[in-house]
Image (tube, rainbow, N blue to C red):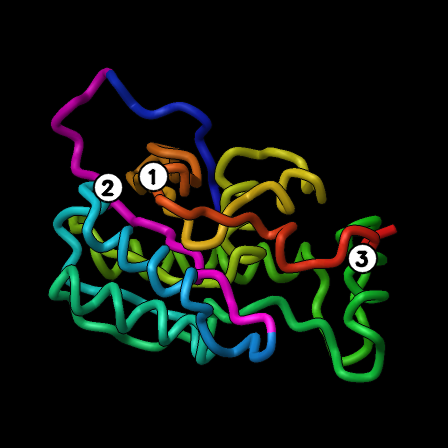
């Protein structure tokens, strides 16, 4: 069972906690979505060079090419080992329906599941279970995960109990970094997803035509 707490514990400063950084993939290339754009590569590099992440020795990544390219850059900058984890993979939209139509329906109903796909509610439960298992494995340690922006957004709503809001997701950034703590009480947010430190940030909305979700 996944439990969230919306505020960090302050009464017991020495209580053992596990810290996780949730990093989303850099901006994809317009012509090849499985590849980072030049700006996307620089976005990820800036995360590694910043002081936002510290103490990470292990990075768990989605199995996608985009996530692996992101993780490779981070691993070199952070001197951390990388391991693929399929429970971090992107939401499955199915293959028998136009992804655009599937996403429009899914944002209207989080329990809607495209044929051969998965509902937002299922994907959110999946990522929660995945992070729980990794946090237990890394008790009192620090680690990072690299996943797609939608999965990162679903985990954030799970921890904070925020509603699934399309506009909030579209406004979120590529190569953003959030941090959370896991303790005996459950999860709490330390730092919300942020990419404002980048010299050339981009949002999820930049990857879609203006009328894509109309």
Number of the label disc, if any, that sits on residue 29: none
Q: Do residues under tags 2 and 1 come within 8 Å of each other at their CB atoms?
A: yes
Relative image position of residue 150 (x, y in whole percent)? 58, 56
Q: Is residue 95 above or below residue 4?
A: below
Circle 1 packing at 10 Å, graded few (<14), some (14-19), many (20+), is few
Residue with the mark numbered 2: 52
Q: Do residues under tags 3 and 1 come within 8 Å of each other at their CB atoms?
A: no
Secondary structure at numbered mark 2: loop
Mark 2 or mark 1, which is nearer to you?
Answer: 1
Residue 74 is drawn in which quadrant? bottom left
Secondary structure at numbered mark 3: loop
Residue with the mark numbered 1: 197
Majority secondary structure of magenta residues: loop
Q: Earlier in the sequence, mark 2 or mark 3?
A: 2
Circle 2 packing at 10 Å, graded few (<14), some (14-19), many (20+), is some
Residue closer to the observer: 25 or 92: 25
Q: Earlier in the sequence, mark 3 or mark 1?
A: 1
Residue 28 painted magenta = yes
Residue 190 painted magenta = no
Q: Residue at x 62, y 67 (%)?
A: 91
Residue with the mark numbered 3: 212
Gap between marks 3 and 1, in whole Å?
28 Å
**In this view of the protein, can residue 14 be seen by the observer?**
yes
Gap between marks 2 and 1, in whole Å?
9 Å
**In this view of the protein, can residue 139 be seen by the observer?**
no
Q: Earlier in the sequence, mark 2 or mark 1?
A: 2
Circle 3 packing at 10 Å, graded few (<14), some (14-19), many (20+), is few
For the magenta stretch, what is the residue range?
11-30
Q: Is residue 69 above or below residue 185?
A: below
Mark 2 or mark 3, which is nearer to you?
Answer: 3
Relative image position of residue 136 (x, y in whole percent)? 28, 56
């Amino acid at each position: 069972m996944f439990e969230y707490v919306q505020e960090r514990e302050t009464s017991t400063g020495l209580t053992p906690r596990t810290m996780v950084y949730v990093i989303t993939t850099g901006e994809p290339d317009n012509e090849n979505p499985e590849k980072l754009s030049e700006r996307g590569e620089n976005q990820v590099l800036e995360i590694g060079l910043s002081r936002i992440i510290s103490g990470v020795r292990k990075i768990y990544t989605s199995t996608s090419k985009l996530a692996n390219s992101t993780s490779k850059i981070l691993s070199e900058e952070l001197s951390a080992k990388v391991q693929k984890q399929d429970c971090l993979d992107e939401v499955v939209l199915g293959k028998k329906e136009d992804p655009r139509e599937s996403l429009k329906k899914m944002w209207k109903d989080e329990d809607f599941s495209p044929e051969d796909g998965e509902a937002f509610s299922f994907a959110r439960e999946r990522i929660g279970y995945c992070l729980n298992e990794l946090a237990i494995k890394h008790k009192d340690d620090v680690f990072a995960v690299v996943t797609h922006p939608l999965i990162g957004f679903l985990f954030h709503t799970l921890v904070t109990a925020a509603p699934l809001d399309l506009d909030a997701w579209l406004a979120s950034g590529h190569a953003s970094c959030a941090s959370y703590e896991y303790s005996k009480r459950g999860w709490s947010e330390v730092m919300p997803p942020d990419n404002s430190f980048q010299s050339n940030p981009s949002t999820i909305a930049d990857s879609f035509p203006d009328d894509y979700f109309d």
